[in-house]
Image (cartoon, rainbow, N blue to C red):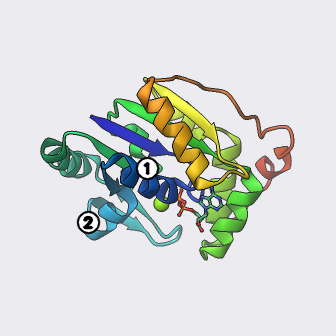
Amino acid sequence: MRIAITGTPGVGKTTVSKVLGDKLGIKVIDITEAVKKYKLYTEKDEDMDSYVIDFEKLEKFVSEIEEKEKTIILDGHVSHLLNPDYIIVLRCNPEIIKERLEKRGYKPKKVLENVQAEILDVCLCESKGKVYEIDTTSRDVEDIVDEIVEAIKHKKERKGIVNWTEEYFDYLTLEIK
Ligand code: ADP
Ligand code: MG
């Protein structure tokens, strides 16, 4: 069984996944880390400082761990593409994501692309099957994790709880070469 914790970079996936994994005693795979560490990519995009993931290799890596562990948490912004049984989509105010990614040292173009992805619901739109969406803005990690535990327990489904497009429309018209 695969539980995906997905969402735009900077939304809080790794922070939430660690606490959730500890609470439930479930192994967490940080997909972003695994892709880098085990070279599960076809090429590195130097300009954007990101990787083109080799999904075949990544799937093999994940399924081998799943076989041993039975239940796993997949932490990453592509985790919803790895045939999960249940998907948690974390959401956060785009300006908070912007601040976090700037602090992380991302290039302006990469920051903007991710801010736009959050505004356009990209991870949510790509998520198929059982999906539960949570707005994490201004919430404690413990509080978010408690809600996820309840959602998993009752296999709750929920989509369409935030709309950033009106307040943050201007970001969608920006472009950085
Ligand atoms: P992701 O894995 O989605 O890229 P991280 O878990 O690395 O995001 O979190 C990005 C930053 O936001 C970190 O500095 C983290 O401490 C902070 N953060 C995450 N969740 C929260 C939260 N609920 N409240 C405040 N800060 C948070
Ligand atoms: Mg992370």
Look at the picture and state if 88 lies above or below 100: above
Front-most of residues 108 and 24: 24
The answer to whether mark 2 is within 8 Å of ligand 2 is no
- Position of 62 with respect to 145 (left or right) is left
**Secondary element type, mark 1:** helix
- Kindly identify the residue that appears in the image at 23 percent across and 48 percent down: 62
Q: What crowding class fits label 2: few (fewer than 14 Cα within 10 Å), some (14-19), or many (20 or more)?
A: some
- Kindly identify the residue that appears in the image at 83 percent across and 46 percent down: 168
Residue bearing mark 1: 20
Q: Is residue 175 visible?
A: no
Q: Position of residue 34 (x, y in %)?
A: 30, 62
Quarter of the image with the C terminus is bottom right
Q: Which mark is residue 39?
A: 2
Callout 2 amino acid: Lys
- Position of 104 with respect to 161 (left or right) is left
**Secondary element type, mark 2:** loop
Q: Quadrant of residue 87?
A: top left
